Image (tube, grey):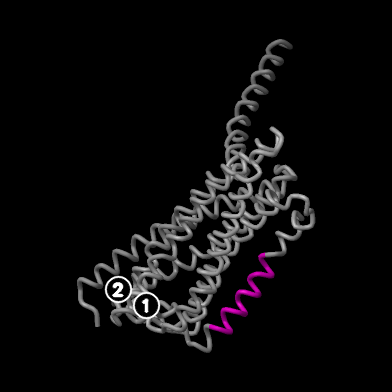
Amino acid sequence: MINDQTKTNGFILSSVSLGFSTFACLISCIIFLIIIYHLYHNHVKREDKITVVICGHIYLVLLIYSSILISMNIRAILGDLYNQSFNSSWCIFSGYLVLVLLGMLYMMFVNQAFYRLIRVVYYRNRWFQSLKLYIVLPFIEIIILTVILLCVAIPLNAVTYLPNDYFCYATFTNIPGILSVASIVYMGPFCCILFIYIHITRFIHQQGNIQTLVVKQRQSRDLLITQRILIIVSLLLILGIPGMTLIFMFIITGEEHPILARIAFFPVSASQMGLSVALLFSIPQLKKIVLNLRTINTVMPVNQTARGTVQMRTITGTQ
């Protein structure tokens, strides 16, 4: 049993995390719907469609992931208030689903980094610049990730019900299970993202002195976008650091904090909220879409007012 102070701290962590996850869910939902609207009505330039589609995938995963986190935080709060147990097969399934979605979130950023690598370094390869490829790729990745994750996590019994937190997740006391899961959903994809952006940055700096002015301007723009995306990569790093730190602390000390999972999820919720906003300002194509929507909403009432004025003048003139 945990004491009252620990339970109060857990309640506060879950409440704040619930607020962060709710904000991320709302922002992700709004921007995802805006992206779908612009793609459906062909308001996106052809050369920008792949970038926008990848952003749409990221926001869709963020939307689903934040929704699951909202459910987990609500269960934790209800458990603190009413000491209600939520141990069930659905709880175990949701625990695995959170891991799959977290891995998919990182894979979406791997796809974004890969496309930028092709666009900047291997721009002559047209096959890897196909829109259909980036539409189908997430479906292939989620199948592969789910199969690998389940093949590793289920035999190790990685996901269990956490009685102090009232939800199911990978238990930190199962060292082989948690390290295997962390390698698949966090460390592997993050290393890929970091390697790709380092390679892009080095390539741009190496090519800076031997290119034409037009190419230099384009590469300068690509470098600026890459630097902005590295801020997002930093948020992805922050997302996993607390959990990995707590794992190694448990390995060294052998002591598990009663609300270890909630402590680990708190920065995850904060980073998720930051990602939903930072991505909007880091990708020029996405920012332009949102600004254009605001411009359309502003211009339409003005046009309607102008047409109304012309019609009134016409009626007055005929009288």
Whether residue 74 is visible, yes or no, is: no
Residue 262 vertical placement versus 164 (above, below): above
Residue at 35% x, 76% y: name it. Answer: 165
Magenta stretch, main secondary structure, is helix
First in residue order: circle 1 vs circle 2: 2
Circle 2 residue: 80
Q: Quadrant of the N terminus?
A: bottom left
User: Between residues 46 and 106, which one lies in front from this camera angle?
Assistant: 106
The location of residue 89, given as percent across then percent down, is: 49, 84
* Mark 2 surroundings: few (<14), some (14-19) or many (≥20) residues within 10 A: some
* Mark 1 surroundings: few (<14), some (14-19) or many (≥20) residues within 10 A: many
The location of residue 79, given as percent across then percent down, is: 33, 75
Circle 1 residue: 166
Is 140 magenta? The answer is: yes
The residue range painted magenta reads 138-152
Q: Amino acid at mark 2?
A: Asp
Is 318 magenta? The answer is: no
Q: Quadrant of residue 44?
A: top right
Q: Quadrant of the C terminus?
A: top right
